[in-house]
């Protein structure tokens, strides 16, 4: 078989899986059947089935998933703080303009499950009188290790604590490894979806891949040329997870790390 004929051969043998992945991940920027095929070609013929299995195991949160989960998060907050006037419950995104937190803030605004006045940014919060505050819900799409909150919290704690108002963290997805970290920082955390240790596909307790397949995945993770901190996902989270707007580095680099030797499937971040 010539090199040029390999893409056609791989597509012919795995067209259904490629088409299904392109459909499932189709609202992620740049993901097409061609993109999925090029990603699959990272794997040797002997390991193509492992690549197909990865495609089938990816936990992907599409636009519709994110909208539904954001609404569910609001319902959880409403229930937990039913005695607090709703005009005193504020959702505060943590992160940069194109972060997952800002994506959730835009969904809150666009779905109108809360009023625009219920969404505040730190610059707004700093100016608000404590009497106008009932509950602060710091929001983000995902926490894999709690590191983002650890980095962000020291900057906002001096603003929040003097307000003497209850605050919680609201997430769409929480990885089990992050729970103790975020609870130590903010106390209560509410999430729509929580991942247990079995979602670390390289972990000995994960049933999703055999030990031989895990070794194969580890080999391909190294082939991406990701740095040691990320070769098994940040802090060795070992996840196969992506969102419409980006892929966290807690996921294995075979999903997101592009290099001269590796075609990434998802963008690390997007609009």
Image (spheres, grey):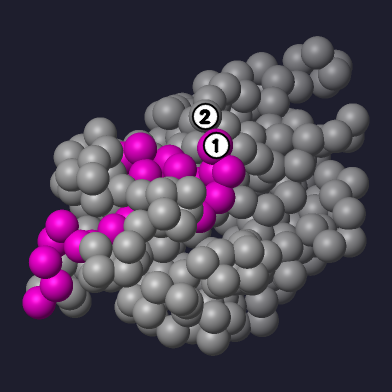
Mark 2 neighbour density, 10 Å: few (under 14) some (14–19) many (20 or more): few
Q: Position of residue 46 (x, y in %)?
A: 77, 46
Q: Position of residue 127 (x, y in %)?
A: 41, 54
Give the label, 1 or 2, closer to the camera. Answer: 1
Q: Is residue 58 visible?
A: no
Q: Which residues are magenta?
A: 83-107
Q: Position of residue 238 (x, y in %)?
A: 66, 65
State which quadrant residue 145 falls in.
Answer: bottom right
Q: Residue at x 46, y 38 (%)?
A: 244
Q: Are the residues at dot 1 and dot 2 in contact (C-beta closer than 8 Å)?
A: yes
Q: Is residue 243 left or right of residue 223?
A: left
Which of 30 and 104 lies nearest the eye of the viewer? 104
Q: Which residue is mark 1?
A: 98
Q: Is residue 239 left or right of residue 271?
A: right
Quadrant location, the N terminus: top right
Numbered circles on residues, count: 2
Q: Is residue 85 magenta?
A: yes
State which quadrant residue 210 falls in.
Answer: bottom right
- The relative height of residue 172 versus residue 187 in the rendered view (above or below) is above
Q: Is residue 176 magenta?
A: no
């Amino acid at each position: 078989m010539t090199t040029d004929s390999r893409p056609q051969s791989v597509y012919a043998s795995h067209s259904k899986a490629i088409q299904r992945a392109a459909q499932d991940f189709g609202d992620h920027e740049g993901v097409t059947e061609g993109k999925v095929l090029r990603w699959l070609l990272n794997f040797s013929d002997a390991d193509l089935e492992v690549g197909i299995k990865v495609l089938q195991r990816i936990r992907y949160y599409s636009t519709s998933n994110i909208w539904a989960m954001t609404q569910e998060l609001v319902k959880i907050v409403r229930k937990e703080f039913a005695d607090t006037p709703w005009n005193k419950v504020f959702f505060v995104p943590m992160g940069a303009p194109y972060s997952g937190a800002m994506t959730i803030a835009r969904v809150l605004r666009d779905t109108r499950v809360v009023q625009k006045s219920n969404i505040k940014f730190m610059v707004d919060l700093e100016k608000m009188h404590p009497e106008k505050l009932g509950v602060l819900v710091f929001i983000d799409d995902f926490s894999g290790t709690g590191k983002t909150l650890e980095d962000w919290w020291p900057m906002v704690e001096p603003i929040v604590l003097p307000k003497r108002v209850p605050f919680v963290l609201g997430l769409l997805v929480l990885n089990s490894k992050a729970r103790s970290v975020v609870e130590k920082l903010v106390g209560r955390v509410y999430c729509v979806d929580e991942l247990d240790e079995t979602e670390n596909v390289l972990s000995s307790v994960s049933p999703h891949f055999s030990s031989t397949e895990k070794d194969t995945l580890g080999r391909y993770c190294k082939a991406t040329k990701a740095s040691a901190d990320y070769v098994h996902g940040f802090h060795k989270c070992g996840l196969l997870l992506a969102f419409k707007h980006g892929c966290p580095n807690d996921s294995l680099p075979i999903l997101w790390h592009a290099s001269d030797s590796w075609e990434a499937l998802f963008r690390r971040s997007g609009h």
